[in-house]
Image (tube, rainbow, N blue to C red):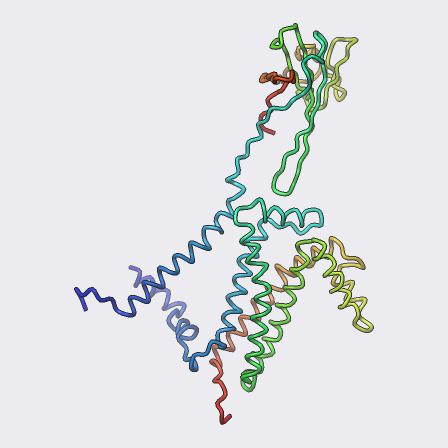
Amino acid sequence: MPGSHHISRRDFVKLTTAAVGTVIGAVFGIPAVGYLISPALRAGSKDAWVPIGKLEDMPIGEPFPFSFTRTQVNGWERTATNYGGFVLRKSEDPNDILILSSRCTHLACQVNWHADTRSYVCPCHDAAFDIEGNVLDGPPPRPLDVYDEFQLDEAGNLLIHIKGG
Amino acid sequence: MWKKFYAWLDERIGLDSLYKATLDRPEPKGNWWNTLGSASLFLFLLQGATGIFLAIYYTPSPDHAYDSIQYIMTGVQFGWLIRGIHHWGSSLMVLVVFIHMVRVFVTASYKYPRELTWLIGIGLLLMTVGMGFTGYLLPWNQKAFWATTVGTQIAGSVPFIGDFILKALRGGTDLSALTLQRFFAAHIWILPALLVALIGVHLFLIIKHGESQFPEKED
């Protein structure tokens, strides 16, 4: 019946089937897509402020070693990464600080402070860095990495900013 | 445009005849008990779909199986829903398949010429139970571990070859990583492949014979 407001039984069934089908599709489809892409929606920020010790415990003019472990969780897998470094207070000024990573810039071994030669020495290939982290000897391509973002909290703890992995 | 495309496909595949054979075939007078086979098929497809989704995050290793399921339940969006459907759907499927079998038995639909459909149906029932048995171990929690310990021991009580069956099921004398791995392989590859193949034959036979009439008072 063209022009009529009546809808044929067949068309009505078609329409309701399509409508109900769309609702069912959405009810199943949206959770399905959410399930698949859920790990991609997680904020993957690895940034953190990590306390490395009380400032008053750190001597002036002598590197103060610190180390900490960060655990990263990916799904059901936990990966622990060790970090280490040295704090060098150059003066009484709490901002006059140089914080070096102890990761050798050559092949990522841990350097040690040798007080007798006033240098950081890498045990792997005998690389040497001066107290400021500059290369003195050996294969490293660049000075030791610096943690340049740090702050003091009210309790006098020194915190450094860790970026990424 | 669409009609031309459809005609092109139909000429080569025979969509119309497929449609007539599968969805437009004559049926005996409607009866809800006759829908249990379709319900079983739907549940199988639902289990297949949710199972594929679970396989995206599940890890069949003793170190990670339990943790990965905890992650699905708490860490993944709608993970609880997907696993919940798979968990409850498995029980429901065993139930529906079993009632379907009882219906076929009570209405004597297994008789000539449908004996093969019945026999294949028995195989499908056993494989459905097998899916339940292998899937039960995968969460790798206490209940799963000990249920499988007991279940494989029962299989091991068969005279003469029991010990061999037990070792074959477990992949060794003890329930181990090998057991988990082979139950996983059976659960997602071997049994589903057999199920799909047998369901195909089962459906072909149903379409070939048509559905059976319910017996009348005089029969």
Residue under the image location 57 percent in, 68 percent down: B197
Q: Which of the image's four quarters has the N terminus of chain B?
A: bottom left
Dividing the picture into quarters, in which one does residue A76 lie? top right
User: Residue B36's spot in the image, x, y percent?
Assistant: 51, 73
Would you say B33 lies left or right of A46 here? left
**Residue A144 makes an appearance in the image:** no
Taking the spot 72% from the left edge, 61% from the top edge, the residue there is B147
Left or right for B175, reference B201: right
* Image coords of residue A149 (percent x, y): 58, 18
Q: Quadrant of residue B119?
A: bottom right
Query: Compared with residue A65, is residue B119 higher up or lower down, i.e. above or below?
Result: below
B71 left or right of B171?
Answer: left
In the displayed structure image, the side of residue B50 where residue A139 appears, left or right? right
Residue in front for this viewpoint, B119 or B10? B119
Question: Can residue A116 be seen in the rendering of this structure?
Answer: yes
* x then y, percent, for residue B140: 69, 53
Taking the view exactly as shown, the residue that stands out farthest to the front is A154
**Residue extending farthest bottom:** B218
A97 to B46, vertically: above or below: above
User: How many numbered marks appear?
Assistant: 0
The extreme left residue here reads A3
At 62% from the left edge and 7% from the top edge, which residue is drawn? Answer: A93
Residue A116 screen position, x and y as percent: 79, 8
The vertical placement of B69 against A95, above or below, is: below
Given residues A31 and B62, the one toward you in this image is: A31
Instruction: Return the residue nearer the eye: A107 or A21.
Output: A21
Task: Return the residue found at the far top.
Answer: A91
Identify the residue at image location x=49%, y=91%.
Answer: B217
